[in-house]
Amino acid sequence: MQVDERVCLITGASRGIGAATARELAARGHAVVVNHRDSATAAEAVAHDVRAAGGDALVVQGDVTDPADMTRLVDTVVERWGRLDVLVHNAMTPFPVTSFADLDWEQLSAKLDQEMHAAHLLTKAVLPGMIDRRRGRLIYLSTGLSRRPRDGMIALGVAKAALDSFVRYVAAEVAPHDITANVVAPSTVEDTAVSDRLPEELRSQLADATPMRRLARPDDVARTVAYFAGDDAAFTTGSWAPVNGGLIMP
């Protein structure tokens, strides 16, 4: 059971999974940092909801692939609260929806570079403080597509597979400092930037193929993220947690 407030940074928190995660963590008594790149109005609405419910929220703009932005983001959080306890890296970088036959190297390498650059920058930025305090939670949003391919999603799936491996290496290295690093890997999630790009017919097919007969919802993912942010998961690290209604059973 969670007993102390934690300061939680959620990247890409203006909508979808990120917004649901900010609200869920705040409801559990944590302070939340609502990060966005260019969605100030939506991010402020999330923060307003948190404050209206009695929580503490701060909106900070920043591009997760920009080193200066990420340094400023973490510095802003530390200036406000004196620490950062939890990183939830949710922000999605752009990717093409295409077959391998039509995928050129520039498209694939751009997605790989952005995905890993963001994860590397954020992890480098938050770890020193966590190591000093000997406490921290690193949570990264991936996708079931890193293990179960789907037509057109090769760039996203390959980039997230690289992220999955990155997290395992980080988890092994930081574990002696009482810091955990875990991956949350949802299937297609309703009301997100990715699902909005899919035709309604395909979304229905994906729901029908899921044993629980529906797509994931942002709140489903948020609750799993909140578990890894708390003390109940203190001895769980390097894990890959599917949130997919039984679509993939590793």
Image: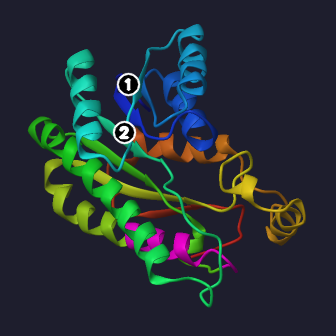
Badge 1 density bin: few <14, some 14–19, many ≥20, Cα 10 Å: few
Q: Is 152 included in the stretch rendered in magenta?
A: yes
Query: Residue drawn 73% across and 45% down?
Result: 191
Left or right position of 9 against 250:
left
- Name the quadrant of the N terminus: top left
Which picture quadrant has residue 24? top right
Whether residues under marks 1 and 2 lie with C-beta atoms below 8 angstroms apart, the answer is yes
Main SS of the magenta segment? helix
The amino acid pointed to by label 2 is Asp
Query: Residue drawn 21% across and 39% down?
Result: 135
Left or right position of 230 against 79:
right
Determine if residue 160 is in view.
Answer: yes
Determine if residue 232 is in view.
Answer: no
Q: Nearer the viewer, residue 191 or 72?
A: 72
Query: Residue drawn 57% across and 14% down?
Result: 48
Q: Provide the residue span drawn in magenta.
A: 150-164
Q: Which mark is residue 92?
A: none
The residue where tag 1 is placed is 3
The residue where tag 2 is placed is 231
> Residue 50 location in percent, x, y?
55, 17
Left or right position of 240 against 80:
right
